[in-house]
Amino acid sequence: MCVVACGSWVLPPCASKGPNHKFGHASKAIPANQISAMALLLVGVVTTLFTVLVHSLIPPMILWGIRLHLGRGRAGTWFWDVILVMNFTLLVLAAHFVEIALWALSFVLCGEFSSFAPALYYSGATYTTLGDNTTVLSPRWRLLGPIEAANGMLMFGVTTAIIFAVIHRLIEAKFGLQRDPPQKTG
């Protein structure tokens, strides 16, 4: 299906078939800014979903690591607990880097950057909510910046919750505060 842009309106496919072809009804013409908004939302939502997918791979790895740590009898030993928390922190930081790279790739694919390196820098500054006042996205894609910043804040919140849960579990093991798991019913 071919869509022809004409000024601020996008004409339906039938308008591009020549002078003898009848035009479709005028109400079927779609404003170009609506298509841009839909593309913007699609890119923002899809990229956000991919970052959530990346982040959802982390908790199972952390649970496996905690079970291994507890099974080896290392829980409650300061040195091994610090090593475990450091490893998990590096793991989630790597996940954040992958997520920043996904956003950078989206910016390159949208045509906002001609190469990956500046897109990665802009994406990192935006994802961490640091900001970058040297780069301004085109009006069509400008709203992707706040969407990425909101996504980054949420993912850092998830990371904080994960690290807090790990430390809480280690404190329980250290002081013998472990509770029995709830009994399955039914």
Image (spheres, rainbow, N blue to C red):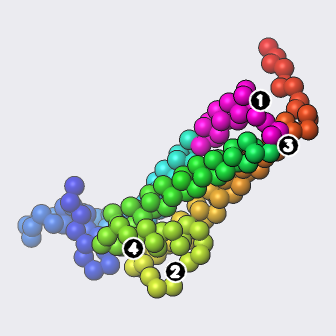
- Amino acid type of disc 2? Asp
Query: In the figure, residue 8 lies in which quadrant?
Result: bottom left
Q: Are marks 1 and 2 in contact (CB under 8 Å)?
A: no
Q: CA distance from mark 2 to mark 3?
A: 40 Å
Provide the residue span drawn in magenta: 58-77
The residue wearing badge 1 is 73
> 110 above or below 89?
below
The residue wearing badge 4 is 118
Q: Are marks 1 and 4 in contact (CB under 8 Å)?
A: no
Q: Main secondary structure of the magenta part?
A: helix
**Residue 132, numbered label:** 2
> 157 above or below 74?
below
Q: Nearer the observer, disc 2 or disc 3? A: 3
* Position of residue 162 in the picture relative to residue 115 (left or right): right
> 115 above or below 183?
below
Residue furthest to the front in view is 79
Which is more N-terminal, label 4 or label 1?
A: 1
Q: Nearer the observer, disc 1 or disc 4? A: 1
Q: CA distance from mark 2 to mark 4?
A: 11 Å
Q: Is residue 145 visible?
A: yes
Q: Secondary structure at mark 1?
A: loop
Q: CA distance from mark 1 to mark 2?
A: 47 Å
Residue furthest to the top in view is 186
Query: In the figure, residue 104 lies in which quadrant?
Result: bottom left
Residue 60 belongs to magenta span: yes
- Amino acid type of disc 1? Gly
- Amino acid type of disc 3? Ile
- Amino acid type of disc 4? Pro
